[in-house]
């Protein structure tokens, strides 16, 4: 699969992180390098699995995390557990969204993470290193040891792939002949999508 860097447009509601310690705080939480915005990124749990996937931008010193609306409150709640120890302000704000080419995002291998797939994938499962959503040089972050170990071990068991299906009922989190469904887009009497499938040895 050819993966292109096609930045995700903003949703109408986004997560905003600001304050004197915003950069330092996020750098120690997220798997991406927050100094290299705009960028894709992920927030992993302590076991290295992806809690949320987002597009990160910097607007006048504040960081904007764009992700599906259903992921905003759980992500905010998790960040607040650690933000209490830093000089940061966290909140959900309204912001004008842009037109998105959802088909192009899927063809380019840009995943999404929803409540149904939260904590289901390692970053490598959904190809996040290939879209610069993971930094292996910036230092520690939550789940970093496990993510780094997978990267340097080099033997992956699952991979992200495109699929086309006539089963228009498939939803993210479903298990199908294509593997676990990551995201879908209906197109007439079929749908296209991304799934995570086992690598055949």
Image (cartoon, rainbow, N blue to C red):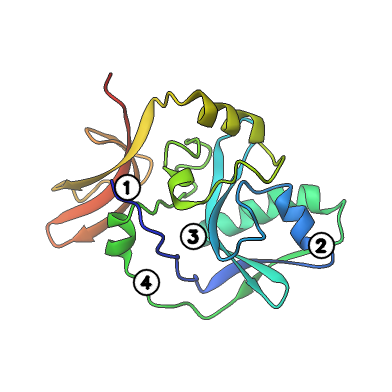
Q: Tag 2, which secondary structure?
A: loop
For the residues bearing labels 3 and 2, Cβ distance under 8 angstroms? no
The 10 Å Cα crowd at callout 3, few under 14, some 14 to 19, many 20 or more, is some
Q: Which residue is mark 4?
A: 100
Report how far apart the C-alphas of labels 1 and 4 lie in the structure.
20 Å
Mark 1 or 4 closer to N-term? Answer: 4
Q: Tell whether label 4 touches label 1 (CB within 8 Å).
A: no
Which label sits on residue 68? 3
Q: Residue at x 46, y 26 (%)?
A: 154
| C-alpha gap between disc 4 and disc 2 | 30 Å
Q: Residue at x 62, y 57 (%)?
A: 73
- Residue for badge 2: 88
Q: Residue at x 60, y 64 (%)?
A: 37
Q: Position of residue 151 (x, y in %)?
A: 52, 31
Using the rendered view, name the quadrant where residue 46 is placed. Answer: top right
- Which callout, 3 or 2, points to the residue nearer the camera? 2
N-term-proximal mark, 1 vs 2: 2
Looking at the image, is mark 1 or mark 4 nearer the viewer?
A: 4
Placement of the C terminus among the 4 image quadrants: top left
Q: Which residue is mark 1?
A: 171
The Cα atoms of the two marked residues, 3 and 2, are separated by 23 Å
């Amino acid at each position: 699969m050819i993966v292109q860097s096609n930045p995700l447009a903003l949703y109408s509601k986004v997560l905003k992180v600001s304050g004197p310690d915003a950069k330092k705080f996020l750098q120690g939480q997220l798997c991406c390098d927050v100094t290299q915005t705009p960028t894709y990124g992920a927030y992993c749990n302590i076991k290295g699995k992806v809690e949320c996937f987002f597009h990160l931008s910097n607007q006048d010193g504040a960081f904007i995390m764009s992700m599906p609306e259903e992921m905003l409150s759980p992500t905010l709640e998790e960040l607040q557990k650690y933000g209490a120890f830093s000089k940061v302000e966290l909140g959900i704000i309204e912001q004008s969204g842009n037109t998105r080419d959802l088909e192009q995002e899927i063809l380019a291998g840009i995943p999404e993470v929803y409540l149904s797939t939260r904590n289901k994938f390692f970053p490598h499962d959904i190809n996040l290193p290939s879209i610069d959503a993971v930094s292996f040089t910036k230092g520690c972050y939550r789940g970093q040891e496990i993510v780094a170990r997978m990267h340097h071990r080099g033997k992956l068991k699952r991979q992200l792939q495109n699929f086309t299906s006539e089963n228009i009922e498939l939803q993210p989190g479903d298990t199908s002949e294509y593997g676990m469904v990551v995201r879908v887009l209906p197109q007439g009497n079929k749908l296209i999508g991304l799934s995570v499938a086992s690598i055949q040895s």
